[in-house]
Image (tube, grey):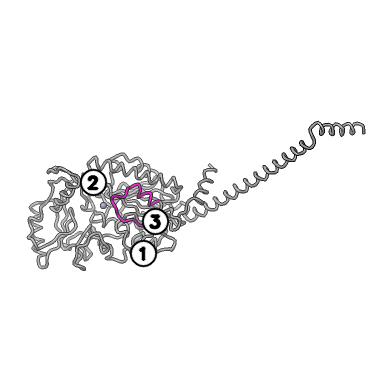
């Protein structure tokens, strides 16, 4: 036991470098629905639930899509505040359609991603971003110290290796790493969440999770690194026949679409807003299964309405339905995976209303600052930012959800800085003790060797019989006396 502690201290002290700030690793599995943990064999994720804190699910923000939700997780803001209104959208200020590019994330300079806040706060805090959406751009003129651009060919296990190598970087040890994995979202879209393909992907991600925690253990980092596993939204099956052809109701050149099913942004040409709206209302009445909203009619609780980038008209399909833009998406999947498509073919979709349970994702946290064996009530992803900031001991400029922090963060845990000092002092003391013991043993052995050498030399010069004769002589002299 003592030897184990000693070896750990010595290993950590001499073999690895790491930050003396609290360390947080945030791992996002895109489109990992809240109940996927029970859908396939996931022993590692289940074990992590027991070892740390988890919620049955998290509520996402509208629209329940990848870029808006990842930016909400990163900034603690709803879409109407941070301005990422979809995976693509029309920007009236530049009169351009915006996709994954810098301007998507730059509308509000008060949106400070957690990796930026970390780097800005102190000179010895370093962030690492492994493919996390929006991470490759600079905010407040700050870019993360460590960075990898999104590359779907980049092996998932290698992403873990790189992320952990940033934490152990000898010069700039990262104390915050954002790790993004685009699965099981991608295969969920193509094959549906009810497919065996997705089941196998869930198992693979559980293996990736195990690999990550094994690697932390191997490098003696488990007791120093807080890990949060989460997803950005869920996924639901959709039949190919559930496509609503709304374009049939509209006149060409009077509108354009942005984003994609099941949330379509409709941008009418000048003077056509009422005409386009009325035609879409007619389509909704006849086709059913979707709702038309003028900007002013979008519910406040979605936190989506109050932004110049909010579309003049929004279409939202009911769960399990899509609009005709989805025909092109299916054609792409068909070509990519050589699929045979019929009316009942199943695909996967997300982006629906926030109160649809299949859109919820998961949350599991484990680490030195995380409460153990603790289940918490579901919460909104917008509040994660305050949890991240608390774990990292950063001053958050966003509203703080103190209840959630109390539920997740273990305040009884020794602070990271104290832990680092204790490990260093104990490591050094034990090292000194070992060196002193080794020196004492060496001196004893040298002296013993010297004595033996002296005896041997005496033996050589004065043979045993001669010595015994001398001793006998002494004894006789004593008796005579
Ligand atoms: Zn996503």
Disc 3 versus disc 2: distance between alpha carbons?
A: 29 Å
Query: Along the polypeptide, which appears first: circle 3 or circle 2?
Result: 3
The quadrant of the picture occupied by the C terminus is top right
Q: Nearer the viewer, residue 22 or 362?
A: 22
Dot 1 beta carbon under 8 Å from ligand 1 = no
Is residue 441 rendered magenta in the image?
Answer: no
Q: Residues within 10 Å of mark 3 (few under 14, many from 20)?
A: many
Is residue 163 rendered magenta in the image?
Answer: yes
Note whether residue 195 is visible: yes
The outermost residue toward the right is: 481
Query: Along the polypeptide, which appears first: circle 3 or circle 1?
Result: 1
Q: Residues within 10 Å of mark 1 (few under 14, many from 20)?
A: few
Give the percent coordinates (x, y) of residue 132. Answer: 31, 55
Q: Which residue is mark 3?
A: 176
Q: Residue at x 10, y 57 (%)?
A: 281
Residue 155 image label: none
Judge from the rendering whether residue 275 lies leftward or rightward of residue 320; answer left or right: left
**How many callouts does the rendering have?**
3
Residue 142 image label: 1
Q: Residue at x 15, y 63 (%)?
A: 267
The outermost residue toward the front is: 461
In the image, the segment drawn in magenta is: 147-164
Disc 1 versus disc 2: distance between alpha carbons?
A: 35 Å
Secondary structure category for the residue under label 3? strand
Residue 188 image label: 2
* Camera-nearest label, 3 or 1: 1
Query: Along the polypeptide, which appears first: circle 1 or circle 2?
Result: 1
Q: Nearer the viewer, residue 448 or 225?
A: 448
Q: Residue at x 24, y 50 (%)?
A: 359
Give the percent coordinates (x, y) of residue 230. Answer: 32, 50
Disc 3 versus disc 1: distance between alpha carbons?
A: 15 Å
Q: Residues within 10 Å of mark 2 (few under 14, many from 20)?
A: many
């Amino acid at each position: 036991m003592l030897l184990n502690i000693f070896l750990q201290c010595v290993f950590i002290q001499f073999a690895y470098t790491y930050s003396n700030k609290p360390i947080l690793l945030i791992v996002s599995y895109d489109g990992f629905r809240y109940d996927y943990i029970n859908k396939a064999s996931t022993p590692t994720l289940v074990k992590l639930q027991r070892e740390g804190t988890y919620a049955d699910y998290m509520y996402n923000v509208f629209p329940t899509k990848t870029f808006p939700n990842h930016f909400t997780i990163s900034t603690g803001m709803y879409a109407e505040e941070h301005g990422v209104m979809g995976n693509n959208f029309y920007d009236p200020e530049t009169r351009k359609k915006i996709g994954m590019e810098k301007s998507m994330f730059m509308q509000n300079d008060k949106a400070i991603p957690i990796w930026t806040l970390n780097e800005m706060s102190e000179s010895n805090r370093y962030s690492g971003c492994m493919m996390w959406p929006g991470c490759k751009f600079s905010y407040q003129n700050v870019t993360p110290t460590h960075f990898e651009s999104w590359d779907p060919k980049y092996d998932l296990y290698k992403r873990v290796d790189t992320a952990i190598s940033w934490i152990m970087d000898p010069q700039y040890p990262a104390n915050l790493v954002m790790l993004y994995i685009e699965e099981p979202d991608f295969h969920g879209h193509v094959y549906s969440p009810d497919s065996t393909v997705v089941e196998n992907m869930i198992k693979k991600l559980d293996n990736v999770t195990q690999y990550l925690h094994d690697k932390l253990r191997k490098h003696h980092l488990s007791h120093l690194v807080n890990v949060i596993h989460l997803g950005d939204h869920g996924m639901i099956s959709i039949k190919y026949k559930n496509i609503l052809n709304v374009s049939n109701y509209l006149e060409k050149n009077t509108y354009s679409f942005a984003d994609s099913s099941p949330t379509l942004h409709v941008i009418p040409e000048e003077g056509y807003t009422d005409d386009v709206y009325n035609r879409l209302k007619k389509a909704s009445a006849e086709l059913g299964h979707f709702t038309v909203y003028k900007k002013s009619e979008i519910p406040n609780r979605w936190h989506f309405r109050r932004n110049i980038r909010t579309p003049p008209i929004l279409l939202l399909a009911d769960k399990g339905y899509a609009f005709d833009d989805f025909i092109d998406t299916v054609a792409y999947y068909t070509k990519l995976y050589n699929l045979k498509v019929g009316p009942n073919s199943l695909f996967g979709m997300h982006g629906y209303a926030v109160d649809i349970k299949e859109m919820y994702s998961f949350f599991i946290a484990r680490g030195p600052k995380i409460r153990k064996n603790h289940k918490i009530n579901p919460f909104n992803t917008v509040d994660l930012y305050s949890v991240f900031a608390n774990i990292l001991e950063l001053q958050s400029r966003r509203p703080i959800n103190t209840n959630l922090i109390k539920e997740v963060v273990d305040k009884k845990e020794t602070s990271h800085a104290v832990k680092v000092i204790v490990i260093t002092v104990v490591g050094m003391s034990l090292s000194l003790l070992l060196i002193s013991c080794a020196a004492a043993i060496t001196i004893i052995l040298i002296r013993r060797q010297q004595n033996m050498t002296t005896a041997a030399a005496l033996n050589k010069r004065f043979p045993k019989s001669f010595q015994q004769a001398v001793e006998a002589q002494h004894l006789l002299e004593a008796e005579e006396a």
